[in-house]
Amino acid sequence: MTDRKGELAGNLAKVEERITAACVAAGRKREEVTLIVVTKTYPASDVRILSELGVRHVAENRDQDAAPKAAACSDLPLSWHFVGQLQTNKVRSVVGYADVVQSVDRSRLVTALSKEAVRAGRELGCLIQVALDAGESARGERGGVAPGGIEELADLVARSPGLRLDGLMTVAPLTGEYAGRQRAAFDRLMDLSTDLRRAHPAANMVSAGMSADLEEAVAAGATHVRVGTAVLGVRPRLG
Protein backbone atom coordinates (compact mmCIF):
# COMPACT_ATOMS: atom_id res chain seq x y z
CA MET A 1 0.00 0.00 0.00
CA THR A 2 1.37 3.38 -0.98
CA ASP A 3 1.87 6.04 1.69
CA ARG A 4 -0.95 8.14 0.24
CA LYS A 5 -3.34 5.19 0.04
CA GLY A 6 -2.54 4.31 3.64
CA GLU A 7 -3.10 7.91 4.72
CA LEU A 8 -6.45 8.14 2.95
CA ALA A 9 -7.54 4.72 4.25
CA GLY A 10 -6.75 5.78 7.81
CA ASN A 11 -8.57 9.08 7.43
CA LEU A 12 -11.59 7.40 5.86
CA ALA A 13 -11.73 4.92 8.72
CA LYS A 14 -11.75 7.76 11.27
CA VAL A 15 -14.54 9.58 9.40
CA GLU A 16 -16.48 6.33 9.15
CA GLU A 17 -16.16 5.88 12.93
CA ARG A 18 -17.46 9.42 13.47
CA ILE A 19 -20.47 8.92 11.19
CA THR A 20 -21.26 5.55 12.77
CA ALA A 21 -21.02 6.98 16.30
CA ALA A 22 -23.22 9.93 15.31
CA CYS A 23 -25.81 7.55 13.85
CA VAL A 24 -25.81 5.44 17.03
CA ALA A 25 -26.23 8.55 19.18
CA ALA A 26 -29.13 9.71 17.01
CA GLY A 27 -30.80 6.29 16.91
CA ARG A 28 -30.27 6.06 13.16
CA LYS A 29 -28.98 3.27 10.94
CA ARG A 30 -25.55 3.84 9.40
CA GLU A 31 -26.90 3.23 5.90
CA GLU A 32 -29.19 6.25 6.26
CA VAL A 33 -26.19 8.60 5.82
CA THR A 34 -24.15 8.79 2.61
CA LEU A 35 -20.59 10.12 2.70
CA ILE A 36 -19.61 12.48 -0.11
CA VAL A 37 -15.87 13.16 -0.23
CA VAL A 38 -15.10 16.71 -1.37
CA THR A 39 -12.00 16.36 -3.56
CA LYS A 40 -11.50 20.00 -4.57
CA THR A 41 -7.83 21.02 -5.03
CA TYR A 42 -6.76 17.35 -4.91
CA PRO A 43 -5.59 15.41 -7.99
CA ALA A 44 -7.33 12.71 -9.97
CA SER A 45 -4.89 10.21 -8.46
CA ASP A 46 -6.48 10.79 -5.05
CA VAL A 47 -9.94 10.26 -6.53
CA ARG A 48 -8.73 6.97 -7.98
CA ILE A 49 -7.41 5.86 -4.59
CA LEU A 50 -10.66 6.84 -2.91
CA SER A 51 -12.57 4.74 -5.42
CA GLU A 52 -10.31 1.77 -4.65
CA LEU A 53 -11.13 2.31 -0.96
CA GLY A 54 -14.85 2.10 -1.62
CA VAL A 55 -15.87 5.75 -1.94
CA ARG A 56 -18.75 6.13 -4.42
CA HIS A 57 -19.66 9.83 -4.12
CA VAL A 58 -17.25 12.70 -4.72
CA ALA A 59 -17.84 16.45 -4.91
CA GLU A 60 -16.22 19.44 -6.58
CA ASN A 61 -16.91 23.16 -6.40
CA ARG A 62 -15.01 24.61 -9.38
CA ASP A 63 -15.68 23.46 -12.92
CA GLN A 64 -12.16 24.27 -14.13
CA ASP A 65 -10.82 21.73 -11.61
CA ALA A 66 -13.67 19.26 -11.83
CA ALA A 67 -14.05 18.80 -15.58
CA PRO A 68 -10.55 17.42 -16.30
CA LYS A 69 -10.60 15.37 -13.10
CA ALA A 70 -13.96 13.80 -13.95
CA ALA A 71 -12.71 13.02 -17.46
CA ALA A 72 -9.58 11.37 -16.07
CA CYS A 73 -11.73 9.24 -13.75
CA SER A 74 -14.58 8.49 -16.15
CA ASP A 75 -13.91 4.75 -15.90
CA LEU A 76 -14.63 4.69 -12.16
CA PRO A 77 -18.02 3.83 -10.57
CA LEU A 78 -18.49 7.30 -9.08
CA SER A 79 -21.32 9.77 -8.68
CA TRP A 80 -20.09 13.35 -9.10
CA HIS A 81 -21.72 16.15 -7.12
CA PHE A 82 -21.20 19.81 -7.98
CA VAL A 83 -21.41 21.84 -4.76
CA GLY A 84 -20.02 25.28 -5.62
CA GLN A 85 -21.69 28.45 -6.81
CA LEU A 86 -22.40 27.81 -10.48
CA GLN A 87 -22.33 30.44 -13.20
CA THR A 88 -24.55 29.83 -16.21
CA ASN A 89 -21.58 29.93 -18.60
CA LYS A 90 -20.22 26.80 -16.88
CA VAL A 91 -23.47 24.84 -17.01
CA ARG A 92 -22.79 22.97 -20.27
CA SER A 93 -19.48 21.68 -18.94
CA VAL A 94 -20.90 20.72 -15.53
CA VAL A 95 -23.86 18.85 -17.03
CA GLY A 96 -21.32 16.78 -18.96
CA TYR A 97 -20.05 15.01 -15.81
CA ALA A 98 -22.14 15.92 -12.74
CA ASP A 99 -24.83 13.53 -11.57
CA VAL A 100 -26.15 16.00 -8.99
CA VAL A 101 -25.89 19.79 -8.73
CA GLN A 102 -26.32 20.70 -5.06
CA SER A 103 -26.14 24.47 -5.47
CA VAL A 104 -29.30 25.36 -7.41
CA ASP A 105 -30.36 28.78 -6.12
CA ARG A 106 -32.02 30.82 -8.89
CA SER A 107 -34.46 30.37 -11.75
CA ARG A 108 -31.99 31.41 -14.46
CA LEU A 109 -29.70 28.57 -13.39
CA VAL A 110 -32.59 26.06 -13.47
CA THR A 111 -33.44 27.11 -17.02
CA ALA A 112 -29.82 26.72 -18.16
CA LEU A 113 -29.42 23.32 -16.45
CA SER A 114 -32.63 22.05 -18.02
CA LYS A 115 -31.60 23.15 -21.50
CA GLU A 116 -28.21 21.45 -21.27
CA ALA A 117 -29.52 18.29 -19.62
CA VAL A 118 -32.02 17.85 -22.45
CA ARG A 119 -29.32 18.55 -25.03
CA ALA A 120 -27.05 15.95 -23.43
CA GLY A 121 -29.84 13.41 -23.04
CA ARG A 122 -29.27 13.20 -19.28
CA GLU A 123 -31.34 13.42 -16.11
CA LEU A 124 -29.63 15.69 -13.62
CA GLY A 125 -30.36 15.58 -9.91
CA CYS A 126 -30.83 19.00 -8.31
CA LEU A 127 -30.73 20.19 -4.72
CA ILE A 128 -32.02 23.61 -3.77
CA GLN A 129 -29.25 25.37 -1.84
CA VAL A 130 -30.80 27.11 1.16
CA ALA A 131 -29.17 30.26 2.55
CA LEU A 132 -29.93 30.43 6.27
CA ASP A 133 -28.04 33.73 6.51
CA ALA A 134 -30.35 35.46 4.05
CA GLY A 135 -33.50 37.45 4.56
CA GLU A 136 -36.73 36.01 3.23
CA SER A 137 -36.06 37.18 -0.32
CA ALA A 138 -32.29 37.69 -0.54
CA ARG A 139 -29.47 35.30 -1.40
CA GLY A 140 -26.78 34.24 1.06
CA GLU A 141 -23.18 35.41 0.90
CA ARG A 142 -22.10 31.87 -0.05
CA GLY A 143 -24.94 31.40 -2.51
CA GLY A 144 -28.31 29.87 -1.85
CA VAL A 145 -31.90 31.00 -1.82
CA ALA A 146 -33.67 32.27 1.28
CA PRO A 147 -36.18 29.85 2.86
CA GLY A 148 -39.04 31.88 1.45
CA GLY A 149 -37.85 31.17 -2.10
CA ILE A 150 -37.63 27.38 -1.85
CA GLU A 151 -41.17 26.52 -2.91
CA GLU A 152 -41.15 28.51 -6.15
CA LEU A 153 -37.69 27.28 -7.16
CA ALA A 154 -38.50 23.66 -6.29
CA ASP A 155 -41.66 23.76 -8.38
CA LEU A 156 -39.64 25.13 -11.31
CA VAL A 157 -37.06 22.34 -11.03
CA ALA A 158 -39.77 19.69 -10.74
CA ARG A 159 -41.44 20.76 -13.98
CA SER A 160 -38.22 21.35 -15.97
CA PRO A 161 -37.28 18.71 -18.54
CA GLY A 162 -34.07 16.83 -17.83
CA LEU A 163 -34.03 17.76 -14.13
CA ARG A 164 -34.96 15.76 -11.02
CA LEU A 165 -35.73 17.51 -7.73
CA ASP A 166 -33.77 15.56 -5.11
CA GLY A 167 -33.99 17.78 -2.01
CA LEU A 168 -32.16 20.51 -0.12
CA MET A 169 -28.58 21.50 0.73
CA THR A 170 -27.11 24.07 3.08
CA VAL A 171 -23.75 25.30 4.32
CA ALA A 172 -23.68 26.25 8.00
CA PRO A 173 -23.83 30.07 7.92
CA LEU A 174 -21.01 32.28 9.18
CA THR A 175 -23.29 35.25 9.85
CA GLY A 176 -26.83 35.87 11.00
CA GLU A 177 -28.91 34.14 13.64
CA TYR A 178 -27.44 30.69 12.96
CA ALA A 179 -23.76 31.68 13.06
CA GLY A 180 -21.97 29.24 15.34
CA ARG A 181 -25.20 27.30 15.87
CA GLN A 182 -24.78 24.45 13.41
CA ARG A 183 -27.27 22.11 15.04
CA ALA A 184 -29.96 24.78 15.04
CA ALA A 185 -29.20 25.54 11.38
CA PHE A 186 -29.46 21.88 10.41
CA ASP A 187 -32.67 21.45 12.41
CA ARG A 188 -34.10 24.38 10.46
CA LEU A 189 -33.07 22.72 7.19
CA MET A 190 -34.85 19.52 8.25
CA ASP A 191 -38.03 21.50 8.94
CA LEU A 192 -37.77 23.03 5.47
CA SER A 193 -37.23 19.55 4.01
CA THR A 194 -40.41 18.35 5.71
CA ASP A 195 -42.29 21.25 4.14
CA LEU A 196 -40.80 20.51 0.71
CA ARG A 197 -41.72 16.82 0.85
CA ARG A 198 -45.38 17.63 1.34
CA ALA A 199 -45.45 18.85 -2.25
CA HIS A 200 -42.56 16.73 -3.58
CA PRO A 201 -42.42 13.44 -1.62
CA ALA A 202 -39.44 12.06 -3.56
CA ALA A 203 -37.26 15.11 -2.77
CA ASN A 204 -35.96 13.52 0.42
CA MET A 205 -32.21 14.20 0.15
CA VAL A 206 -30.79 16.55 2.79
CA SER A 207 -27.13 17.49 2.27
CA ALA A 208 -25.60 19.16 5.32
CA GLY A 209 -22.52 18.96 7.48
CA MET A 210 -18.82 18.99 6.69
CA SER A 211 -15.62 17.88 8.42
CA ALA A 212 -16.12 20.08 11.50
CA ASP A 213 -19.85 19.59 12.05
CA LEU A 214 -20.93 16.29 10.51
CA GLU A 215 -22.13 15.01 13.91
CA GLU A 216 -24.58 17.89 14.25
CA ALA A 217 -25.86 17.23 10.74
CA VAL A 218 -26.39 13.51 11.38
CA ALA A 219 -28.14 14.31 14.67
CA ALA A 220 -30.50 16.65 12.85
CA GLY A 221 -31.33 14.03 10.20
CA ALA A 222 -29.09 14.79 7.20
CA THR A 223 -29.00 12.06 4.56
CA HIS A 224 -25.68 13.18 3.04
CA VAL A 225 -22.56 14.74 4.60
CA ARG A 226 -19.83 16.47 2.57
CA VAL A 227 -16.38 15.80 4.01
CA GLY A 228 -13.11 17.06 2.55
CA THR A 229 -10.35 17.99 4.98
CA ALA A 230 -10.99 15.11 7.40
CA VAL A 231 -10.40 12.62 4.57
CA LEU A 232 -7.86 14.32 2.31
CA GLY A 233 -5.99 16.51 4.77
CA VAL A 234 -5.53 20.28 4.99
CA ARG A 235 -5.94 21.70 1.54
CA PRO A 236 -2.92 23.14 -0.25
CA ARG A 237 -3.18 26.88 -0.70
CA LEU A 238 -4.36 27.93 -4.11
CA GLY A 239 -2.24 30.46 -5.92
Image (cartoon, rainbow, N blue to C red):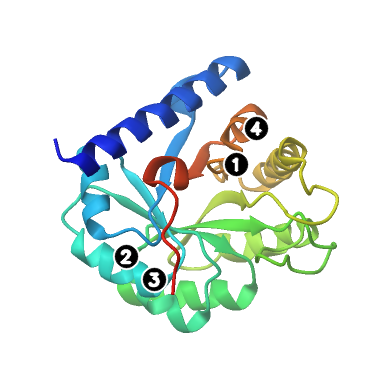
Q: Mark 3 points at which residue?
A: 94
In the figure, residue 109 lies in which quadrant? bottom right
- The picture places residue 47, in percent across and down from the top left corner, at 27, 51
Q: Is residue 62 left or right of residue 46?
A: right
Alpha carbon distance from label 2 to label 4: 31 Å
Q: Mark 4 points at which residue?
A: 216
Q: Name the residue under label 2.
A: 97
Q: Residue 201 carries which label?
A: 1
Mark 3 in CB contact with mark 1 (< 8 angstroms): no
- The picture places residue 15, in percent across and down from the top left corner, at 44, 31
- The picture places residue 213, in percent across and down from the top left corner, at 61, 38
Alpha carbon distance from label 2 to label 3: 6 Å
Kind of residue indicated by mark 3: Val
Q: Which of marks 1 and 2 is in front?
A: 2
Q: Which of marks 3 and 1 is in front?
A: 3
Q: In this view, does 164 lie to the left or right of 76?
A: right
